Amino acid sequence: MPALDPLFVLCAACVILPLLAFGGIMIFTWRRPFLSLGISLAASTACLIIAWYIFWQRWGDPTPLVLNVDWLVSDLVRVPFGFLLDPVSQLMLVLVATISFLIQIYSIGYMWGDPGFGRYYADLSLFAMAMLGLVISSGLLQLFICWELVGLASYLLIGFWYEKFSASEAGKKAFVVTRFGDIFFFMGLAILVIFYGSLDIAAINAAAVAQKMEPWLLTTCALLIFGGICGKSAQFPIHVWLPDAMEGPTPVSALLHSATMVAAGVYLLTRLFPFFAASPPAMTYILAVASLTYVLSSTVGMVARDIKQVWAYSTISQLAMMAMGLAAAGLAHGTLFAGYFHLTTHAGFKALLFLCAGAFIHHYGTNSFFMMSKGGARHLTIPMVTVTIGALALAGIFPFSGFFSKELILGNLWHLDNKLWVSIGLLGAFLTAYYTFRVIFVLLFPRPEDHPAWDKYHEPLAGGHGHGHGHEEEEAHGHGHGAGPFSGHAPEWAINLPLIILAGVTLVLGFLQGTLERFLLGESHPHEMNYLLLVLAVGLALAGIGLAWWDWGRKGASWEGFLSKVPALEHFFIQKWYMDHFWRWFLNAVIYNLFSKTFTYNDRRVVDGGVDAVALGCIGSGRFLSFLQTALLQLNLLFMVLVLAGVGIYLLMGR
Amino acid sequence: MSVLQFGVELYYLVMALVLFFLTLRREPQAAQDHRIAFTLSTVGVVVALLCLTQQGELFFRSYRVDLFSQIFKLALALGLFLVLAISRNLPSIEERNHAEFYLFLTTCTVGMMMLVSAVELLTIYVALELSSYSLYILVPLRRGDDIDVEAGVKYLFFGAVSSCFMLFGLSYIFGATHSTYLSDIMARMPELVASPIGVVGLILAMAGFFFKLSIFPFHFWAPDVYQGGAHQVVTFIATASKAAAVALLIRLAVLGAQYGYHFTQILVFLSIISMTLGNLVAIIQKDFKRMLAYSSIAHAGYVLIGILTLQETGLASSIYYALAYLVMNFTVFMVLTQVAQDGRDLKIAELAGLYHRSPLLSMSLILGIFALAGVPPSIGFTGKLFLFTSAMNQGYFWLVLIGAVNGTLSLYFYLRVVYAAYFVDAKLPPIYLSPPMRALNYALCATILYFGVAPNSIMELARAAVRAVL
């Protein structure tokens, strides 16, 4: 493939421009917020244009296009560097570029006056670069590199307010936990290279479809790679980093938990869908894990009091749903469309929900939606309307985008012989509708001032483990208006514009289902309407909303969830199924006490001891040799003569 | 037009004459002397550059002008220019001796320029002594305590003894081949393979240059002279004089090509001992210049690796490394003279806080030190890579392994310098650098990096030069 193919250049520009922006800002302009903003926005706009151009250029052309150049060539190993353009990656490219562009716009308002404004935009650029690179990678190694860069950028962004202890801890947690999954991912890649010999995505998929791979290899690699997906997409049991990741600035949460970072995991699952689908055992396992995650996160979402926490758990649950959809499709010989379509719609409405949450947080300086409600959140018209639209989509109500994609996934689950999966899906839909509208109703219908419920919710968010602490002060500190070059108030339009755009997307996207399916698969399957399922799903979602209305919305509602009737269960949910406790115990007992101790001992005694011995030996021999260098001229000369004499004798005798 | 072929040397002779008249002045005018000397040396570089492509033979074939010699002449001219560039402030030499300082540097340069062109044994010897005598005078010029006298005496003694060895060796060669012309000797060497007289003579003859290059066992002078001499003098000894010695070693070593195993074995032995001894003893040094002295012993060992391959690539890598060493060692010495502006000796620990005192100097220091240590992408790394590759291709696996281990050892004391400059804080005033000095800093840094990344132009030149010798 010629290196100067215009599409190749465009793809490369898509990756390199944000990287240049990152480097330029970090090295030269980070002290000058507006210049940094300009650089970052310019790069991001260019990426947006390129992404849409590629999308438009290759519209209706489902044949994958691989553009590779050799990057590393050794004797037997050839590592290509290149891009894979097919409908799957093009759609994701557009998605990522659009969302990150909108987030950058939104952040102008949200981060206004922050002392780290320049650094923030540099990190955003790095993130965009990593994510765009990940999406269009043609090989798994290149994808893995970008994958890790995404991890790095997310670490930087989550821990952006590093002076806040909980934020830097959350950043570290996100980094370490996802890395834990990446170990498996990398092992999977290593096994694939050793036994199959290539990491080219198209080749792997083709080989899996043609059943050229041995089943054990396929299943092992699929499961190991799924380990990485678990980490990034926050699936059970390593989902624990995601709720903590809310410590970052809210636009970051929106970016990380809509179209990027967490979606990267599901995207990889989609990318390698034929590969995964060739291994039914792996798909069954994925289905089980995803279902467990779905239930877990939905139940925890019912009791969270921090608006970002609710959206965080809903993210986990929706990711689990996508994984379920893909796994079910794999098992039932379906297509990747359902899961991928949900990924697309979810990107829109989840970004919208987070950005709305950000607008509230920005305005009220608190993360608790009870306190927002008290502050009069219902009067913030644009965020309130848009958050309701987002919530309707999340709950899966017609005609919002979530409805269409959820229907498809449930349809996939319905096709499985075991009806357990679809009942879990339906249960999840019910719970999702409930906890989503719990937030909406609380925001919309505050209780009167003297209502007893206020006593319960008035205290600051101290109960939740660490996160939520001190958001108020810190974010207020973050928004020191008028500091330095920032004059006046943050521009309102910057916050509102992305909300309106995303709300529009949420409304429209569902109706594009057929178009997108034709684009992705090259053909459109007529869906036989399953009225029973449709009624069940919509009915349960409406039932969830109704229950939420009964508990939180109606005039005499007590503002106590139906769960408080079962305190044990509620406590279990509030403690997040004790997952954090489990990991704490696991870290202490297994990692620290078993591995760390042994390895530390080995490090101290064997490695350090050896190194010290070598170093001391060198210094000692240096001391010893320096005795040659005496001040006695005669001795030195004698030594010189002796050495030459020795050389002479060697030459005379050695022959 | 044969006079023009002697042009560079003539120019420097005239320059020495001008400087000689300056020394006769009753009232010393240090600033003016420096201006004149510096201007003349700047022109000298241009002259050497213009003469780069000359070819020919002079003085009854005892003097050959070819690419090999002209490259080294350019390097020597550059060395003198650089040393004079940091000599504007000469606190360690008495003001009335400044003109002498310039004069003897110039005569030394003339001597070395003749050295690299000489292809006849006696010419070689005379040229060598011309450059050595100048240095014997320069070393004890330092003002102050008697450490300089001790250094001067030691330098003279070791120089004299190694000259003795060299003359002895030359007499052997002359006796065996009945000629003092290298070309004749080279033709007759194969006849001598059966008897050891040729190779013994050759090794002894090389002693004079082992001394200049401070290769074991002729290294004893280095630490004392480095520590005792004035910074600028030591800089000259450590840069220009090393390059000339490499040139002559190459000229002589190719004579021994027929001896094969035994001849190279001795060079391998000397190379390994030099590297190891230099690096190990450098670890415990506290004085910066003394540490650099031991590091120069180690680097002499590295250069020998390329020479002992006796192949075009190896010799060319030696030339590349000698030139690289000139630049990187000069960079470190330049930092040294700028930090110790009162001319005192510097302990490594006294570099503390350099990062805050002058970021530019500490950048030059870190680049120079990393180049010495062989960290990519500096010229030092590329040079070492060339040397080791050429030796590896000749099958010297163990030599290369020991060289690589030595490279690791040397990191220890080089990094101590970096550590002191960057990680230790000291409340000392910032160092002021004049604009030309800043430009020099930038130029050196750029050279170290540029030719480390793109060494091909220099390497091609070095190969062409070696072809003139082989």
Image: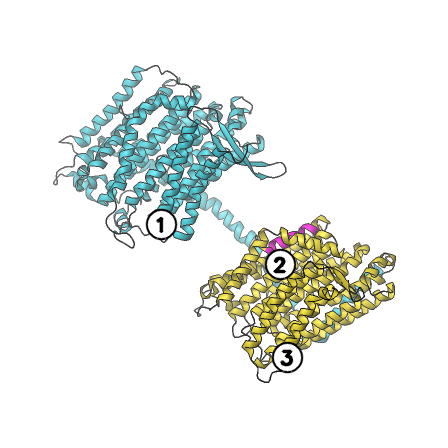
Chain colours: A cyan, B yellow
Q: Is residue B453 above or below residue A154?
A: below
Q: Is residue A113 left or right of residue B16?
A: left
Q: Position of residue B263 (x, y in %)?
A: 79, 58
Q: Position of residue A54 (x, y in %)?
A: 43, 31
Q: Residue at x 81, y 69 (%)?
A: B168
Query: How many angstroms separate mark 3 from mark 2 (CA)?
Result: 35 Å
Chain label for disc 3 = B
| Residue A213 appears anywhere in the view | yes
Residues packed near mark 1 inside 10 Å, few (<14), some (14 to 19) or many (20 plus):
some
Comparing A534 with B120, the one in front is B120
Q: Position of residue A448 (x, y in %)?
A: 12, 38
Proximity of marks 3 and 2: CB atoms separated by less than 8 Å: no
* Tag in front: 2 or 1: 1
Task: Give the residue at mark 3.
Answer: B21
Answer yes or no: are tags 3 and 2 on the same subunit.
yes
Q: Main secondary structure of the magenta part?
A: helix
Three-letter code for the amino acid on which mark 3 is drawn = Phe
Q: Position of residue A369 (x, y in %)?
A: 23, 39
Q: Is residue B437 left or right of residue A303?
A: right
Query: How many angstroms separate mark 2 from mark 1 (CA)?
Result: 41 Å
Farthest residue, direction bottom: B26
Residues packed near mark 2 inside 10 Å, few (<14), some (14 to 19) or many (20 plus):
many
Image quadrant assignment for residue A566:
top left
User: Is residue B389 part of the magenta span, yes or no?
Assistant: yes
* Tag in front: 3 or 1: 3
Chain label for disc 1 = A
Task: Give the residue at mark 2.
Answer: B324
Task: Give the residue at mark 1.
Answer: A35
Three-letter code for the amino acid on which mark 2 is drawn = Ala
Query: How many angstroms separate mark 3 from mark 1 (CA)?
Result: 61 Å
Q: Earlier in the sequence, mark 3 or mark 2?
A: 3
Q: Is residue A271 above or below residue A118?
A: above
